[in-house]
Image: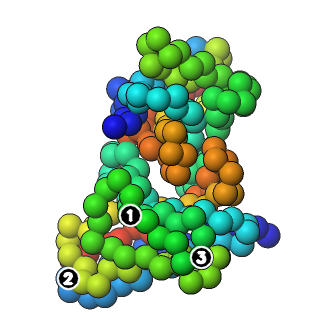
Amino acid sequence: AQRVTQPEKLLSVFKGAPVELKCNYSYSGSPELFWYVQYSRQRLQLLLRHISRESIKGFTADLNKGETSFHLKKPFAQEEDSAMYYCALIGNSGYALNFGKGTSLLVTP
Amino acid sequence: EADIYQTPRYLVIGTGKKITLECSQTMGHDKMYWYQQDPGMELHLIHYSYGVNSTEKGDLSSESTVSRIRTEHFPLTLESARPSHTSQYLCASSESRILSEAFFGQGTRLTVV
């Protein structure tokens, strides 16, 4: 069975502080991991994906297979980063995303 | 403009009523999905489709049914709504290739009283 765990429901940081949103997964095969984001009054959208190894809006995420983690990081948080963040996984079947419960990030001035 | 649309955005309905939640996409995507999300909880996949005349049940058992008669249209139906069906329903679509990005609609927030 595949499962995505986001241990923090709410994370509050000050503007300019580093931020790390945690994501752990359980899956027996080789998963592909994603981060989706939902800003206030907007729809859920892709932030970044593991296979692209890209940095989007200053965010990066590294897949650590030993720790089965895919934490999302940003060195200097901005107020506009306040949003709901979902970690998601696609297993070998590749048919659909399996989401975590999400972490609400609040960046205060 | 290519997009994915869900109607209605909000629906309050009485127990026992039949309802259909609409989802349409103009993105030319073959794959479509329905997710259910309770407040503070993860999104659960309840239905998906690889293309026309293809429908599959997702990981979360649901009393709802879906149909895919046209590529762009993927409606979800509840024959007899119950309070336990109160939830947010999100529709999404993606290209056929594995690991392609999923695009989500605005969602329908359903309340059954």
Which residue is nearer to you in this view: B14 or B19? B19
Figure quadrant of the N terminus of chain A: top left
Res A89 visible? yes
Mark 1: secondary structure: strand
Mark 2 → mark 3, Cα distance in angstroms: 31 Å
Q: Which residue is mark 2?
A: B15
**Residue labelled with disc 1:** B57
Q: Residues within 10 Å of mark 1 (few under 14, many from 20)?
A: some
Pointer 3 chain:
B
Q: Are marks 3 and 1 in contact (CB under 8 Å)?
A: no
Q: Which of these two is toward me, B72 or B4?
A: B72
Give the chain of mark 2.
B
Of residues A35 and A98, the one drawn nearer to the viewer in this rendering: A98
Q: How would you rate the neighbour count of disc 3 (Cα within 10 Å): few for under 14, some for 14-19, many for 20 or more? A: some
Compared with B98, A81 (above or below) is above
Q: Secondary structure at mark 2?
A: loop
Other residues around mark 2 within 10 Å, as few (<14) / some (14–19) / many (≥20) = some
Q: Earlier in the sequence, mark 3 or mark 1?
A: 3
For mark 3, what is the residue?
A: B52
Q: Residue furthest bottom?
A: B17
Q: Which mark is first along the chain, 3 or 2?
A: 2
Q: Report the residue at 79% width, 70% height from top.
A: B1
Q: Tell me the chain of label 1.
A: B
Q: CA distance from mark 3 to mark 1?
A: 15 Å
Q: Work out which quarter of the rendered image holds the C terminus of chain A and state it.
A: top right
Check residue A7 in the rendering and tell me which mark sits there, or answer none. none
The kind of secondary structure element at disc 3 is loop
User: Residue B55 location, x and y as percent?
Assistant: 47, 70
Q: Residue at x 64, y 76 (%)?
A: B71
| The image quarter in which residue A28 lies | top left
Measured as percent of width and height from the top left, residue A12 is found at 45, 25
